[in-house]
Image: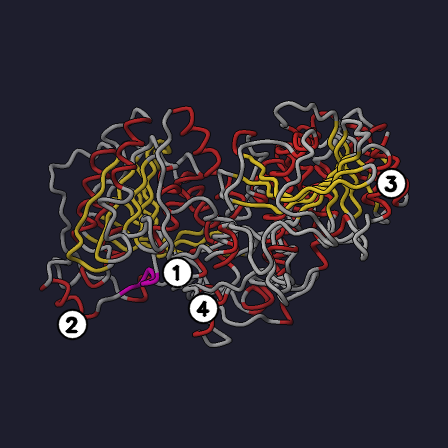
C-alpha cells in the first residue's frame, strides 16, 4: 500500500469528506485476503543471506556504530555485564623442545571447573625482553588436525603445503612458526575437540533433539528454553574461554601485553572476529576464510541468539578498526570478498585514519583452508605489526612432527575431568554458575536503592533492552500515515489507516476513535485482539474504550505484527517461525541439528520484539503531528499484552506520558518452548518483566500484578528516582482509566 505523506489522524478530523470506505464491525485497512505490504511477511533472514557492510560517512558515526556492534556481540554472548573473572588456576607441564621453539601443555579454568586446554609454544632460549603473543583458535579440523602421510603429499602437490613432516599438522605448524618468529603462542582447543571434552563434540557441534531432562527452571542444560532466555550458549562459553585465554597469555611474565594478536581459520576465524571486536587487548587480528557478506558460519558453535540481527561478519570484523586487521579468502563463501567487503573495509580504515592497517589476500584457487600460503600472509602481517624484524617473505621451516602423546594435555599426574566434572552434570553446573553470577549482578539493578545504582540500572538494563528489542523510537521523518476509511458517528469519528515506517518498510494497520470534545490526549489501546480490541462483538466500542472517548480521549488501536490483518484466514500466531540452518525445514529429518532455534533468533527479531517495534512506530506518529498539538500520550496494555507495553515503555521513556501495564501474571520464565510467540532471548537474564519495568522510572506507571516482590522492587526503584508519586500499584480497569484521565 502506497502511504500518504506524514500526517496525524487528527488532521483528518478537520475534514469531513468521506474517505474510501466506512467501517462496519471490526475495521479493516487492507482488502480482504491481502496482508500489509511489509517485508516482515516475506522471506526471513538466514545465515546464507546477504550481509553487506555500509561504511559510515563520518568517524564519529563509525565510533557510535562500532560501540553498538560490540555491545550486541557482548549481549548475544551472554557477557553483558561481564562475568566475574575467577582464578585461572593455570597448570603448565610437559615441556618439549624442537629447534627454535618449545612446547608445553596447558590447562586452566575459565569458570570454576570449566577447563580450557591447549599447547603453549615459546621461542627457544630465555627472553631478554617481553615478547609479542598470539592466540590461535581453530575451526572444525581441530587442534590435532592431521592430513596424514598421503594427504600431505596431495597438499604439497597443489602448492598448499611445503613439508611432509610439519605440514601434516597445519595448526601446529602455524603455532610453531610463530614461536620461531619470536611470539609466545597459545594454540587452544575449541569446546568438544581434542582435550576439551567436558561437553561432548556431539552436543557442542551437532546438537539434534531437545532433552526434556535438561529443561526447567532448576536443572536446565544448553539449547533449552531456559538457557536461551538467559543467553547461555556454546558460542558464549567459547567466547568466554577466548577472553580467559587472553588473561592467561597476559599473565605470563615474558608476554608484552601491548602486542597481542589473534588468528584462526574458519570457525577459528569466527572466534578471532568475536574476541577481537570486544576485547581491546587484541592489538592485531587476522581471521581467515570467515569474514564475508554471504554465509555467516554454519555450526551451532558459530551462532547465537541476537548476534547477526542488523549486522554480519564483515561488520563484526570491522569493529577492530583502527587496529590492524588482515584476512584471507578462498574458493568458499569468502570467494567474493575482493568486491564485497574488502573495498568497504579499505574505505573504513581510511575514514578511521588508519590507512594501510587493513589488508586482505585472495588466493581463491584454493578451497577452504588455512594452508601454508595463507599462513605466509599472516606471518608477514605479524612481522609488520609486531616489529619482528624479519626479511620477507617469512617462510616456514620444517621440524620433526610432535608425537600424539606430546600433544595431549591430560594424562598421568594430570587426569582428564570425569564424573561430575563432565557430561550432563557438568553442563548443568556451569550453566548454574553462569546464571548465579549474572543474577548477582542484575538483581540490585531491578530494585536500585540509590542514585548511583539507578544510573547503573539504566546503563546495564537499558543497553541490554536496546539489543533485545533492537530499536529506538523512530525519527518523525521516518514515519507516515495513509488514511483509508472514516465514519462520522454521534459524538465521535472513527478512522482506519496505515501507519508506515519508511526506514524499515513496515506497515501497521490502525483504527482510531476520536471524540468531538477531544481534550488533546491520546491513548494507545494494546489488546491481544489487535485493533479489533477497540470494539465489542456488535461493532460498538469496548466499554472501557467508550469511557475514555466520553472523557475526551482519542483512542488508537493497532494490529501489531502477527495480529489481525497480519494473519491469513485460519492462521494463528502461537509460535515464532521455525526457520532452519538452510531454511529448508521440510527437507530435514526431525532430529537434525539444523533445526536449532539459533538459526532464527540469531538473524531475525522475535515476534515479541517486532510487536514492540510497532508500538514505537505508532508512538512517533501520534506524538509528531504537523499542526495539531498532542498534549499527552498514554498507553494501556490489557492482560496478555502487558509485557509488550513494559518493553515499549523501557525504550520510549517519557515519550509515553502514562503507562498502564497489566501483566496478567505473565513471566518469560514460565515459557517452556523456545518457539512460543512471546519467547524473547535474554529476557530472563535481564530480570524478566521486572527488567523492562525497572526502566519505566521516573515516568508515571500503573502496574497491575499480584507479585508482592515485584511491587516492592518497583516502589524501591521509583523512590530512588525521586518519583514515588508517579507509581500506582494494583487496582482494576476503572482505576486504570482514572489514572490515564488524571
Q: Nearer the viewer, mark 4 or mark 1?
A: 1
The coloring applied to the image is: secondary structure
The residue identified by callout 1 is: 298
Q: Nearer the viewer, mark 1 or mark 2?
A: 1
Which mark is drawn over residue 159? none
Q: Residue furthest left?
A: 157
Residue 480 lies in what quarter of the image?
A: top right
Q: How many marks?
A: 4
Residue plotted at (80% across, 32% down): 516
Check whether the beta carbons of the residues at disc 4 and disc 3 lie within 8 A of each other: no
Q: Earlier in the sequence, mark 4 or mark 1?
A: 4
- Gap between marks 4 and 1 measured at Cα: 11 Å
User: SS for tag 4?
Assistant: helix
User: SS for tag 3?
Assistant: helix
The residue identified by callout 2 is: 150
What segment is highlighted magenta in the picture? 140-145
- Gap between marks 4 and 2 measured at Cα: 29 Å
Q: Residue furthest front?
A: 17
The residue identified by callout 4 is: 206
Amino acid at each position: 500500500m502506497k502511504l500518504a505523506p506524514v500526517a496525524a489522524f487528527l488532521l483528518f478530523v478537520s475534514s469531513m469528506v468521506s474517505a474510501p470506505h466506512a467501517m462496519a464491525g471490526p475495521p479493516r485497512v487492507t482488502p480482504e485476503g491481502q496482508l500489509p505490504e511489509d517485508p516482515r511477511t516475506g522471506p526471513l533472514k538466514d545465515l546464507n543471506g546477504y550481509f553487506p557492510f555500509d561504511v559510515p560517512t563520518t568517524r564519529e558515526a563509525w565510533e557510535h556504530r562500532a560501540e553498538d556492534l560490540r555491545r550486541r556481540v557482548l549481549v548475544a554472548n551472554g557477557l553483558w555485564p561481564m562475568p566475574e573473572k575467577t582464578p585461572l588456576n593455570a597448570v603448565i607441564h610437559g615441556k618439549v623442545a624442537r629447534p627454535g621453539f618449545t612446547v608445553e601443555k596447558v590447562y586452566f579454568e575459565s569458570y570454576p571447573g570449566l577447563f580450557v586446554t591447549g599447547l603453549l609454544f615459546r621461542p627457544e632460549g630465555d627472553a631478554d625482553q617481553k615478547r609479542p603473543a598470539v592466540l590461535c583458535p581453530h575451526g572444525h579440523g581441530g587442534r590435532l588436525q592431521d592430513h596424514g602421510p598421503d594427504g600431505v603429499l596431495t597438499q604439497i602437490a597443489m602448492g598448499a603445503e611445503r613439508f611432509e613432516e610439519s605440514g601434516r599438522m597445519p595448526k601446529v605448524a602455524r603455532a610453531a612458526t610463530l614461536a620461531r618468529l619470536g611470539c609466545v603462542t597459545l594454540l587452544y582447543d575449541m569446546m568438544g575437540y581434542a582435550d576439551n571434552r567436558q561437553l561432548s563434540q556431539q552436543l557442542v557441534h551437532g546438537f539434534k533433539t531437545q532433552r526434556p531432562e535438561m529443561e526447567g527452571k532448576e536443572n536446565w542444560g544448553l539449547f533449552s528454553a531456559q538457557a536461551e532466555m538467559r543467553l547461555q550458549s556454546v558460542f558464549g562459553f567459547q567466547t568466554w574461554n577466548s577472553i580467559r585465554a587472553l588473561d592467561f597469555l597476559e599473565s605470563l611474565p615474558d608476554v608484552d601485553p601491548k602486542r597481542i594478536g589473534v588468528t584462526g581459520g574458519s570457525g577459528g576465524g569466527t572466534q578471532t572476529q568475536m574476541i577481537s571486536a570486544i576485547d581491546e587487548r587484541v592489538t592485531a587480528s587476522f581471521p581467515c576464510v570467515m569474514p564475508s557478506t554471504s554465509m555467516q558460519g554454519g555450526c551451532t558453535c558459530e551462532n547465537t541468539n541476537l548476534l547477526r540481527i542488523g549486522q554480519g561478519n564483515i561488520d563484526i570484523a570491522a569493529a577492530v578498526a583502527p587496529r590492524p586487521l588482515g584476512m584471507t579468502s578462498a574458493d568458499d563463501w569468502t570467494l567474493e570478498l575482493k568486491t564485497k567487503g574488502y573495498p568497504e573495509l579499505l574505505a573504513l580504515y581510511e575514514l578511521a585514519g588508519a590507512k594501510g592497517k587493513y589488508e586482505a589476500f585472495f588466493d581463491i584457487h584454493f578451497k577452504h583452508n588455512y594452508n601454508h600460503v595463507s599462513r605466509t600472509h599472516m606471518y608477514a602481517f605479524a612481522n609488520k605489526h609486531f616489529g619482528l624484524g624479519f626479511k620477507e617473505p617469512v617462510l616456514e621451516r620444517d621440524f620433526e612432527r610432535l608425537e600424539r602423546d606430546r600433544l595431549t594435555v591430560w594424562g598421568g599426574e594430570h587426569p582428564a575431568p570425569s564424573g561430575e566434572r563432565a557430561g550432563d552434570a557438568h553442563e548443568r553446573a556451569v550453566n548454574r554458575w553462569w546464571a548465579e553470577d549474572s543474577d548477582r549482578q542484575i538483581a540490585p539493578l531491578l530494585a536500585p536503592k540509590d542514585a548511583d545504582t539507578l544510573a547503573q540500572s539504566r546503563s546495564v538494563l537499558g543497553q541490554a533492552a536496546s539489543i533485545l528489542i533492537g530499536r529506538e523510537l523512530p525519527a518523525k521523518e521516518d514515519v507516515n500515515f495513509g488514511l483509508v476509511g472514516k465514519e462520522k458517528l454521534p459524538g465521535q469519528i472513527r478512522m482506519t489507516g496505515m501507519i508506515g515506517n519508511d526506514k524499515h518498510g513496515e506497515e501497521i494497520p490502525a483504527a482510531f476513535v476520536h471524540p468531538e470534545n477531544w481534550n488533546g490526549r491520546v491513548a494507545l489501546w494494546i489488546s491481544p485482539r489487535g485493533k479489533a480490541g477497540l470494539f465489542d462483538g456488535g461493532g460498538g466500542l469496548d466499554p472501557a474504550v467508550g469511557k475514555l472517548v466520553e472523557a475526551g480521549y482519542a483512542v488508537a488501536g493497532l494490529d501489531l505484527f502477527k495480529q489481525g490483518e497480519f494473519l491469513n484466514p485460519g492462521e494463528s500466531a502461537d509460535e515464532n517461525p521455525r526457520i532452519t540452518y538452510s531454511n529448508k525445514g521440510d527437507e530435514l529429518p526431525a532430529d537434525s541439528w539444523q533445526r536449532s532455534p539459533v538459526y532464527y533468533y540469531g538473524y531475525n527479531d522475535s515476534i515479541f520484539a517486532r510487536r514492540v517495534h510497532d508500538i514505537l512506530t505508532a508512538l512517533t506518529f501520534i506524538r509528531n503531528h504537523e499542526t495539531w498539538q498532542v498534549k499527552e500520550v498514554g498507553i494501556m496494555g490489557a492482560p496478555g499484552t502487558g509485557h509488550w507495553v513494559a518493553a515499549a515503555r523501557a525504550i520510549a521513556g517519557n515519550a509515553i506520558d502514562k503507562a498502564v501495564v497489566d501483566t496478567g501474571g505473565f513471566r518469560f520464565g514460565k515459557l517452556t518452548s523456545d518457539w512460543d510467540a512471546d519467547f524473547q532471548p535474554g529476557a530472563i537474564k535481564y530480570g524478566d518483566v521486572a527488567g523492562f519495568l525497572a526502566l519505566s522510572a521516573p515516568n508515571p506507571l500503573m502496574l497491575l500484578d499480584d507479585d508482592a516482590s515485584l511491587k516492592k522492587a518497583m516502589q524501591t526503584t521509583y523512590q530512588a528516582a525521586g518519583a514515588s508519586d508517579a507509581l500506582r500499584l494494583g487496582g482494576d480497569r476503572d482505576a486504570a482509566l482514572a489514572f490515564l484521565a488524571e
